[in-house]
Image (tube, rainbow, N blue to C red):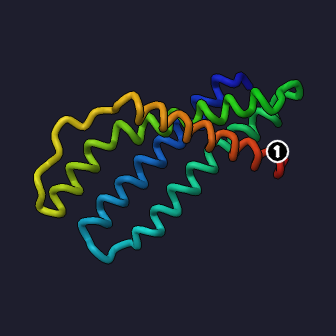
Amino acid sequence: MDPLVDIAVFGIAGAVLLAALTGLLLVAARRSAALPKGALGAACAVLLLAVPALAAGRTLGGDPAAGWGQAFLVASAAVVVVYAAGMALLPLVARQAAAGRGVAVPRGLRLTPAAAGGGLLVCAALGAAGTGIALLLG
């Protein structure tokens, strides 16, 4: 399969799962004892490692000529799609958190260049970790 298809499939699937976990977190925040927040954090961490590992594994398994570099790029790009979805959901989460605590709603949440660059570095690190997992398991 084409690496762009792998990025789209795993990125979109990861973004949908992240949105579902965010929804669970918002519901759990309203019901103080519904779900432990640590469990949701662990689920997010597993998601952020599973998406690049599956994308890299699919790339390595689907193309005999694909190497570590191509698998790393596919895994990192898939995580970037999930990161973009998380950044899009950030204002909603911030408003709900502020409303739950009874404080003023933060205005003008903007993605700064430093946050974007740091996010891309984290995506690259997760892509490398996912590629390493795929190489170990594959």
Residue located beneath label 1 in the image:
135
Depth check, front residue: 26 or 111: 111
- Of the residues shown, which amino acid type is indicated by label 1? Leu
The image shows residue 131 at horizontal and vertical percentages of 73, 41
Q: Give 40 or 24, whichever is nearer the viewer.
A: 40
Task: List x then y, in percent, for residue 111.
Answer: 34, 32
Query: How many circles with numbers are drawn on the protein?
Result: 1
* Helix, strand or loop for disc 1: helix
On screen, residue 103 versus residue 54, left or right, reads left
The furthest residue to the bottom: 33
Asked whether 93 or 12 is in front, the reply is 93
Q: Residue furthest toward the front?
A: 114
Q: Is residue 71 above or below residue 93?
A: above
45 on left or right of 85:
right
Residue 72 versus residue 95 in the image, above or below: above
Rendered view: 123 above or below 35: above
Split into 4 quadrants, where in the image is the N terminus?
top right
Residue 79 is situated, as x and y percent measured from the top left of the image, at 56, 38
Q: Position of residue 6 (x, y in %)?
A: 66, 30
In this rendering, would 79 be left or right of 28? right
Give the residue displayed 28% in from the left and 50% down from the top. 93
Residue at (44% x, 34% y) in the render: 84
The residue under the point 65% across, 39% down is 127
Which of the 4 quarters of the picture holds residue 114? top left
**Crowd around label 1: few <14 · some 14–19 · many ≥20 (10 Å):** some
Q: Residue at x 48, y 68 (%)?
A: 39
On screen, residue 21 versus residue 111, left or right, reads right
In the picture shown, does residue 44 fall above or below 1? below
